Image (tube, helix red, strand yellow):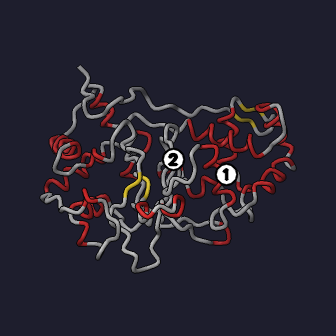
Amino acid sequence: MKRCYILIGFMIGGMLLLSFSFDEKTSKTSSKAALGELLFNEKILSLDSSVSCASCHKPEFAFADTATFSIGIYGKLTSRNTPSVLNMKNRPYYFWDGRAQSLAEQSLMPIENPDEMGLPIKEAVARLNQSEKYRQLFKKIFRQLPNEKNLAQAIAAFEETLETVDSKFDDWSNNISELSESEERGRELFVGNKAKCFDCHSMEDFTDDNFKNIGLFNGKEANDTGRYRITKNLSDIGSFKTPGLRNIAVTPPYMHDGRFKTLEQVVSYYNTPFMFVDDPVNMDAVLMKPLGLTQQEKKDLVAFLKTLTDKAYQK
């Protein structure tokens, strides 16, 4: 009997291997996703041709970045920590503030962002049309020259392939292997009433796709108001999208501002939020009471979180 009571609707299967074929001399691709992978790594889509999507979403770090803020054109820093783009296929919102509602919509925003790639989409399309290679590829795949719509579709098609379901936890869920004693204790804490992690980090990618104010906003500094920037609803001040936890162990630092360098610091924060931020504004009520985790319980939670790392990203 499969132990799938942890997750509702858990998806079973192996990691989708990326096996796109591209021969630059003959300009052959096999799919929209293959073209999207080229574009994801294409630096001419930035104003000074210095960075690409992959410059911040680094494959070796589970398509995230290990810097607090990533470096964009002319050495500019991004305003938020770079999240992973793995396991984004089934998300209803994108970016920390949820301002995009599809992968295609999301894919163009970093290209235009002045602190990231800084290139107007009209200019990005013009550059692609100036390239014989890309003219041929778009005509082959889309039967038309590069334009805003098919540029977005290609990048989104590649990002849709970046799904991971081959972690130690997945093996446990499918009765292939066991968790260690510490990992199992951490799992029980994760889904239990003491730590309550599963209240927000649920479903197959360990996110409820909702927005939460976890107490990092206090209004005393030039804090990021998060979701409020999009909705203008006062209840959204300081709220950010709940990130998925797959591969979380290899995508530090954490939170929208990258303030925590380790998973241990994250767990300590949730254990006693008021020890880190004075007078948080609009904090979710469920987080106001300290969890009361012991040192061993905090270690066990971290041990469980590490089981969510796909084998392709284990070091």
Q: Amino acid at mark 1?
A: Leu
From this viewpoint, which residue is outermost toward the bottom? 220
Question: Mark 1: few, some, or many residues within 10 Å (few <14, many ≥20)?
Answer: many
Please tell me the numbered disc located at residue 167.
none
Helix or strand or loop: what does disc 1 sit on?
Answer: helix
What's the residue at 47%, 52% (across, down)? Answer: 61
2 or 1: tag closer to the N-terminus: 2
Label 2: state its secondary structure: loop
Report the amino acid beneath label 2: Tyr
Instruction: Nearest to the eye among marks 2 and 1: give it.
Output: 2
Q: Is residue 161 left or right of residue 34?
A: left
Relative placement, left or right, of 48 versus 179 is right
Find residue 97 and report its horizontal and vertical position in percent. Answer: 50, 57
The dot on residue 93 is: 2
Q: Quadrant of residue 37?
A: top right
Q: Using the image, determine if residue 101 lies above or below residue 280.
A: above
Quadrant housing residue 260: bottom left
Residue drawn at (39%, 40%), measured in percent from left and top? Answer: 205
Q: In percent of the image, x 67 and y 67: which residue is there?
A: 114
- Total labels drawn: 2
Measuring 70% from the left and 51% from the top, which residue is drawn there? 42
Q: Quadrant of residue 150?
A: top right
Foreground residue, 57 or 315? 57
For disc 1, the marked residue is 108
